[in-house]
Amino acid sequence: MAPEFSLRLAELLSSRLCHDLVTPIGAINTGLELFQENMVDLSQDSVEIMGLIQHSSQVASSRLSFFRTAFGSSGERTSFGEARALIENYFSRSKIEFEWKSPFQEDLILENWGRLLLNSVLWVSECAPKGGIIQVTLPDEVSAKLSLGLNTDSIILHQGTVEALEGRVPLSELTPRTIPCYLIHSLVKKIKGLLECRKTELPSGLLLEIRGRK
């Protein structure tokens, strides 16, 4: 199976899966909100249980929205503002913080760059299990360059991820952990760009840069 066809198939499957799950999870969120508005004489334990259920439902909803755009074909024309909102919802309860460098043109749409941003942030965050700060510089109308700089206490580069970023892993050897990196590689090829990933001079720093034509 050709790599392009495999990627297209994965995109469509991801879109279908996320689409079919978004509606029922959204209905659960709505039902919980209505239930909480009408709660009477519930014990403290019941209130805490309801809170846990609602928290899990909200997390599931934000992850589905993120994955639907990052992995599905519908994310090709995602604006940077939309991508930033998805990222902030996804990481709202994590140990990862973000610094968005100026200028930030939230309405700017560069085909496939929104997906590149989402998948790149996902991978870089997985390199910092103890949390950290990701500094994001986005492309603009002059420079087609995406830069993610990670500052953290410790960095973990999981086996095969860097190789997948560089396209040095056969399709047959990809894993659930390395497939997002291979997707980044495939998207960089689509924009005819260049990718560079390196550790920085900081004790625990990582820099991912993607350059391409708009």
Image: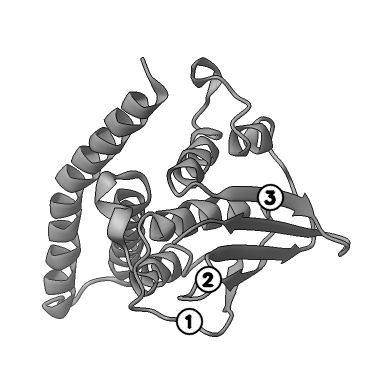
Sooner in the amino-acid sequence: mark 2 or mark 3: 2
How has the structure been colored for display?
Answer: one colour
Task: Tell me the quarter of the image containing the C terminus.
Answer: bottom left
Q: Residue at x 28, y 29 (%)?
A: 9
Q: Residue at x 53, y 40 (%)?
A: 185
Where does the N terminus fall, quadrant-wise? Answer: top left
Q: Name the secondary structure under disc 1.
A: loop
* Count of marks placed on residues: 3
Contact, mark 3 vs mark 1 (Cβ under 8 Å):
no
The reply to whether residue 126 is in sight is no
Mark-to-mark CA distance, 3 and 1: 22 Å
Pointer 1 residue: 104
**Disc 3: which residue:** 196
- Where 203 falls versus 105 (above or below)? above
> Where residue 210 appears, x then y in whole percent?
59, 56
Residue that mark 2 sits on: 138
Q: Tell me which amino acid carries mark 1.
A: Phe
